[in-house]
Each structure stands twice: as C-alpha cells, then as structure tokens.
Amino acid sequence: MTSILLIIALALPSTAQAGWFRKGKDKERKTYSEVDEKGASGERTKDGAPAAEDDEGAEHDGEDAGTTSHGTVDLRDADSSMREEPKAVQAPEGSLWDFIENIEGAVPTDEAVPQSEELDEERQAEHTFLIEGVNGRPPEAFYADPLAATADDPLFLNLVNPADYDIPVVINADVIRWMRYFTGSGRKYYARWLERSTKYRPMMYEKLDKAGLPRDLVYLSMIESGYATHAYSRAAAVGLWQFIAPTATEWGMRVDWWVDERRDPEVSTDAAIAFLGYLNKKFGSWHLAWAAYNGGPGRVDRAVARHGTKDFWKLSKAGAFPDETDNYVPKLIAAAIIGHNPERYGFTGLQYQERLDYDLVQVPPSAGIDVLARCAGVSVAQFQEMNPHLLRFTLPPEGKGLFVHVPKNGKDTFLAALDKVPPAERITFSRHKVRPGESLGSIAKRYGVSAADLQRVNKISNPNKILVGMELVIPGKGGAAAMVAANDGPRAEPKAPASKATASKSTSEQAPAKAMTSTAGAGASQPKATKITHVVRKGEALSAIAARYGVSTADVMRWNGISNANKVNYGSKLVIYQKASAWSTHVVRKGETMSEVAERYGCSVADIKGWNNLKSSEIYVGQKIKVRR
C-alpha cells in the first residue's frame, strides 16, 4: 500500500506533491492559541490558522556543512544550492480581500488596495519560487555589467565581508537561494522596496542608533512589508513592520476603529525596536530573535529546549520551525547583502523617494481631517498620506486628543490656524453600524445628509459596496459637511507638470463656482471647467463615468441631484463639469493592461508612455500612472 501511495505522489506535478506531503506533515502538528505563539507578523499556515511547531522533530548531530558561525563565510555548499530541493510550501488560496474586509470591517482604502495587492503578489511569487526552485544562473540582463552574469561568482559571494554588517551574516545554501530570488524573479519587487526605503530608513536609523540596535534591522521591515505603511497580509498583519493586532497592542500600539498605529511609521518602528530588543535579549541570538518575530517566542523557546541548541541553522535542519520561519532568517540576510551594494547586483536607475519629514502636534478630539488639513495648508489627500494611522475622516471623540503629523516647521502656523476655528465648527458627527438591507442612500436619508457627503467622509470608493456591520461616520448638517465638500477632490491627483503645453480653453459655458469647489483647496482660485453632457450607456456605473472625466463620484451625484449611486438609468443625461487639461493618477489593478487604461481615460497608449517616460507598454500591479484627459 505504501509503495502505491509513493508512486501516486511522485506522479503528481511539483506543486501537488508539495501540498500532498505538507498535508501529511500538518497532521502531526498541534495548534496553539496564545498570543505568545505568534510573532509580530503572525506566521500562518495556508488555511489562515496560526502555525505550530512539530512535536517530534528529528535531532540533528553535527554541523551543517553549509552553515558557519558569525563572522565567517563558508562557500563549500554554494554550488550545491542549485541542486537542493526547497522545503514544500503551499501557496495561499482565496481572495486577499476576503481577509481584509473581515479585518477592517470596512471597504479597503485607496492606499491599502495597491500596497496590499503588491505584497500579496510578492508572497505568491515567493511560494512559486520555493516550490519550483531555480534553474541556471541569473540572465545577463539582470546586471548592469553583462560580464557579471557569465562570471564564476555571479552573486559576488567572494566580495561579501561579514564585517561590513552589524547583524550576523552567513553564506549558505538557503541565503544563496534568496539572493537568487531577489536578483531573479523577485527583482521587480526588491527594486520597488529600494525606491521606498529612502522615505523611512533615515528615521529608522536614528531610532535604532538611539536604542543601540543594529542598523541592518531595517531589512526586517523590508522583507515584511516592502516599506509600505498600508500593506495588509493574509495573516492580518499591517504596516511597515507587519504587526498583527494582539502583538501590536501588547507592545503599546493603539489599534481600534478610529486609529491603527501599526500604520504610523514612527510608532510602529518604536514598537518593533522594543520587541526585537526584547527577543534578542531573551534568546541571545539575532537569528533566533528574527525567528521569534516571525513565528512567536513560545515556539522558539520550545525548539531550544527540545533540541538543546540556540543555533538557528541546526534547529531549522532538525525541523523545529515551520517552513515560513525556516526561510525568514536567510531571506533577511540575503536582503541585507544585496541592499548594502545594490548597484553591484544591477539595481540602478531607481527613483528613490524623499524622506518623510514632519512635525508632531497634539490636537483636541473630534476634529475633522478636512479641518486639520486646511489648517496645515495641505490637501486632505496630503494630510492623510502624512497620517496613515488615522482611519476615519475625524479624530476619535474621547481622550485628551491625538498626535498628528503636520508639514515640517509648520507646527506653530498649524496651531494658530486651528485655534481660530470654533470648536463647534471643527466637526460634529455620530456613528452608525450598517444593518442588513441598508444602502448608503437609505442611511443618508435617515440622518438628513447627502449620500455624497456620507461617501466622502467615510472614504468609500464604491458606494454600491457597504458591508453589514460596517461602522460609518455620519457628518453633522451644515458646517462640517460643507467643509468636507470644499476640501475633497481626486485624492491621488498630482499637480500638472510644467510643460510648454497649455490647458485647452473652455468652448462651452463655465461651471458655477459651487460645482468646482470639491476640486479646489482652501483659498485657491476656482479652475475653469467645461460643461459636458454624458448619456449613460448600458451597464455603466456612476463610478466609471466619474473616473472617465477625472472627477469624483460624489461630485457627479451632487451636480445631478443623485441620492443613490446605484440608481442611474440607461439613457439618462448627466451633467459633468470637467476641469480643462485635468491630470489624474491611475493605480494599476491586477490584470490591467496599458491599452485598457488608455481606453478607460480616452487617450492612447503612446500618450501614457509619453506622459510617464515609459519605454515599454508593460505595467505592474500598484504602479501609479499619470494620465491627462
């Protein structure tokens, strides 16, 4: 019988074999529910349950031929890395948003969608890489120097000096495997991570220096989130350091309906530094500290006790950890090795982001985000980008207030402007939990506000998609709703770049000032607009119509007196006030092609390539493309 099962297993495709053997392994595992069993990022099995260690791991005698102690480099096993089979890994299944919508209790924000999909796509690429393995060396195109790919040492292992790093760097088959991933199929992700790194690393370096911890711990954030503040994982982890909620609250972060400090770059970095410092002190090993960050301190404790060693590589070979934790440590080391010399590995011509810099200010409770943005002299979108930890369109009503980020050297100006706004005009609101059968229109009617304001305040991009149990902020009548309308606009819309091209002149009547207030900042002159009549075609959604003309759905609803975005009839004539030469930013979704984007915005592929200085028509998920209408 055993022989028959073995023959069947060997006949299966590689991915099926991986799943078949993994299921047999999983049956021998226990499941632990304590918070201590989860690391910061909540290492999980494929079904979403917390992964637990093997109870009966084989003891390992002797040294691993490809593993060295800290401070040495052993190349004995380098060539064999190409022949080794990776441990079986099962790719996650199902939609990412099935997880996220349950976590948030709300429609995912515009920022969360591309960042989370990119992270999920990269995780899937890792799974594929580990299952299929790597054959051959990286192609020559991966490197700036074509000769590098034909060299005997294409990964420049002979140039890796552990003394150049302040974390314990070793070279073995597992580290080499991840170096091949980052310079091969994972190259596009690593490049994006490098581009984002300069936005957050200066702050991280300062905090790590102050805590006396290694600077190279920034690579842990890199492999966790790709330096994305809004990234969600399938394990319900969030932010730069990918904390799950229980671990986040345990280490002092606020995670509730109003605020999620896992998204706050500084607060989450402070928590990660405290947690990593604790783990390193507890285990006396950075390798085990990283394993515990991923898989949980309790699992590492039991592994050390059972196998009688604190050598991560021995524990890994003995089967003491889940596959994800086994790969976590070598992946971090590989990321650091490449990150110290990115040009050496062909990462050139990158567009690095500017450092995130701001002042920290404490403000009273219940203030509207729109009011705070106006006082800070920035748009609502800019203020939200600076304050990713604020989940709602208003600050929480309780407590002494909350710390927010305002532009650097703008603290005094901000406080003076806020002081001039009467408390009653800062915002008034109530909360409503969506019940079965309710729509955005029916809720708006109940509270005597417009569906457009309700959609805008709660950052709902699709008014047709509200979830039962979701809690909504209901803006008060009068001032608050008016301020929201006055400051809202296309959230990702950049300023038109300087060029010799001039805006097209309006050929028909100009829109009333009120119609364009949603696209103008406080004190700005009203842009000229063209009045357009759009006839609704069969199957067209209001959101698609708005996107076509570069305006918000809420604006279209207000201009045409529409209270329910779901009720737009075929053949109806809609009035659209379109800004002349309007620029918008489109975030590429999964499966989209450039031709589809061009068709959506009424332009050509050549236009998009020219506006964005693109040489090819290839686009990737999460990429931001500038379009002009």
Image: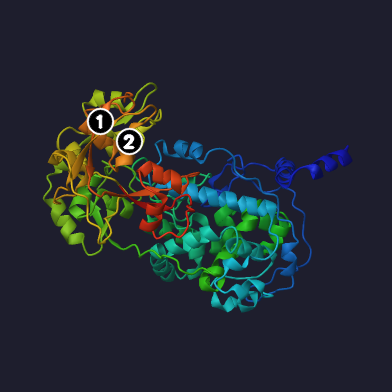
Q: Residue 424 at what x, y percent from top left?
A: 14, 40
113 relative position to 575: left or right: right
Up-down relation of residue 198 to residue 519 (above or below): below
Kindly identify which numbered label has been placed on residue 545: 2
- Residue at image mark 1: 574
Q: Which mark is residue 535?
A: none
- Tag 2's secondary structure? helix
Image x and y of residue 332, in percent: 57, 63
Residue at 36%, 36% (x, y): give it. 544
Residue drawn at the location 26% of the way across and 26% of the way down:
563
The residue nearer to you, when weighing 358 against 85, is 85
Mark 2–mark 1 CB contact (< 8 Å) = yes
Query: Which one is nearer the viewer's eye here, 174 or 51?
Result: 174
The amino acid type, in three-letter code, at marker 1 is Leu
**Residue 157 found in image quarter:** bottom right
Q: Residues within 10 Å of mark 2 (few under 14, many from 20)?
A: many
The answer for how far apart the CA atoms under marks 2 and 1 are is 10 Å
Q: If the image is split into quadrants, where does the N terminus sit?
A: top right
Name which quarter of the figure residue 330 lies in. Answer: bottom right
Given the image, on which type of amino acid does mark 2 rest? Ile
